[in-house]
Amino acid sequence: MNITIDVKEMEQYTKVKIVGEIDAYTAPKLRETIFPYAEKKNTKIVIDLSEVSYMDSTGLGVFVGLFKSLNANEGTLQLTGLSERLRRLFDITGLADIMNINSEVEGGV
Amino acid sequence: MGFRDVMHEKYKEILESYMEDQNEQALYLSQKFSRKSIEYKISPEEIISIHKTALMELEAERSDSVMPSFDILLEVMMGYGLAYREHQSLRTIQQELKSEIEVAANMQQTLLGTQIPDVDCLDIGAISVPARQMSGDYYHFVQDEQGAVSVAIADIIGKGIPAALCMSMIKYSMDSLPEGRHEPYQVLESLNRVVEQNVDPTMFITMFYGMYNTINHTFYYSSAGHEPGFFYNHETKEFEELYAKGLLLGVDKKTKYRQFEKRVDVGDVILLMSDGVTECRTEEGFIEVDTLIGYIEKYIHLEAQEIANKVYKELEYLQDFQLRDDFTLIILKRIK
């Protein structure tokens, strides 16, 4: 049960690549790593989830928190590369309707 | 320069001065050194090593000068002794806190306890097993005078004490809804407002709320991001998903929830569950929905409580008796 989080601050947005599993054990690390970026004004965060093999409700909580925090600071969140299982999780919870989500991994933005 | 860089020299100076004439001032400086080294998290064995190096550098080979050096070492180690005793007493306090949490967990169980309603036409079963000390899953039954049985099943995202407190809040908001019948979508909308206002922004709740009308035998339901349940049609012997989609509670206070309905005939079964059931994980990966349905089907002819218990046993066995997530399964079976 491990996770690696790679954050790159690009000119136009902050690119995050997550590899591993997002659950109750790894969620705190994810939150600590990404939240500071969401607290800045007008940030755009793009998160690549194509190599996330598992995510539970705690992980989902991190993304909802991130989404709310970005919204409050006029930023945006985009999630890319969701597997079918992850996609379903965002669908059931109604989050797919309010968040910017796509299954494709974004090429050059 | 930091303490770490100079501590060697400093210690050597104190030691040298004391070895020369055993003055009080050196002992006083040792106490100061002790406090400082604890503050900078220098370990006891590092101190011993500093002492040894200093002795070598001072070329103190004769035993009459080595002996007094231990007075300095002793003085420095005294601070560590105090810190150790403090650590011991903190451990006791920690144990006290732990047992207090256990009391809280028990109290939680009592506070949140719900009674399975007793109605002629329904056989109801429920099982809820926490993965750790305090459960993040919650279910609640309400029966009104007009014969409707309502059931809420919720998962608080975020575990431990905050989740437990949050759960109590949910229960009391549900209890304090005004008298009279409440449609599932109304309950969710009202709870959503409470959660949005009162809960930490990183904590969320998924909830499925259903109301079984025992007069027209229709099940009305709405979902706030909760795992969909299943419906078993007795006549066709087929399972279908109790599809309902809606946003998690606590994300947006203006959220509207859609209500769905399902006609229930004798022998039909409604199954509601937490994601600990559908996201059950084994060595080989997640169990497929078909596998889960297979287990349910195997026991569907039994009494509701028996179905719940048996399905739990099967999944517990699959996971090698190590629950990864809280497990809650509720079964409503129409018997007449």
Image (cartoon, rainbow, N blue to C red):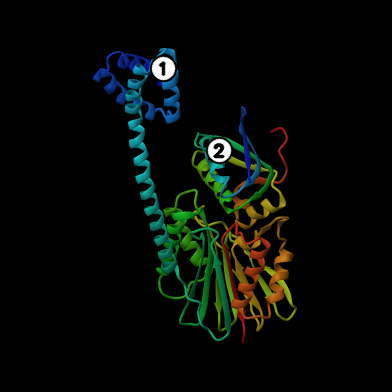
B44 with respect to B206 (left or right): left
Secondary structure of the residue carrying numbered label 1 = helix
Numbered circle sitting on residue B326: none
Q: Which residue is mark 2?
A: A34
A13 with respect to B29 (left or right): right
Quadrant of image for the C terminus of chain B? bottom right
Which chain letter matches label 1? B
Q: Which residue is mark 1?
A: B55
A18 with respect to B147 (left or right): right
- Residue B265: image quadrant is bottom right
Residue at far front of view: B63
Q: Local crowd at mark 1 within 10 Å, few (<14), some, or many (≥20)?
A: some
Q: Is residue B121 above or below residue B245?
A: below
Secondary structure of the residue carrying numbered label 2 = helix
Q: x%, y% of residue B195?
A: 46, 57
Q: Are marks 1 and 2 on the same chain?
A: no
Which residue shows up at 43% across the image and 61% down it? B105
B33 with respect to A2 (left or right): left
Tag 2: amino acid: Ile
Which residue shows up at 57% across the image and 47% down it? A25
Q: x%, y% of residue B221?
A: 58, 69
Which chain letter matches label 2? A
| Residue B265 in sight from this viewpoint | yes
How many numbered marks, from 0 up?
2
- Residue A5: image quadrant is top right
Tag 1: amino acid: Leu
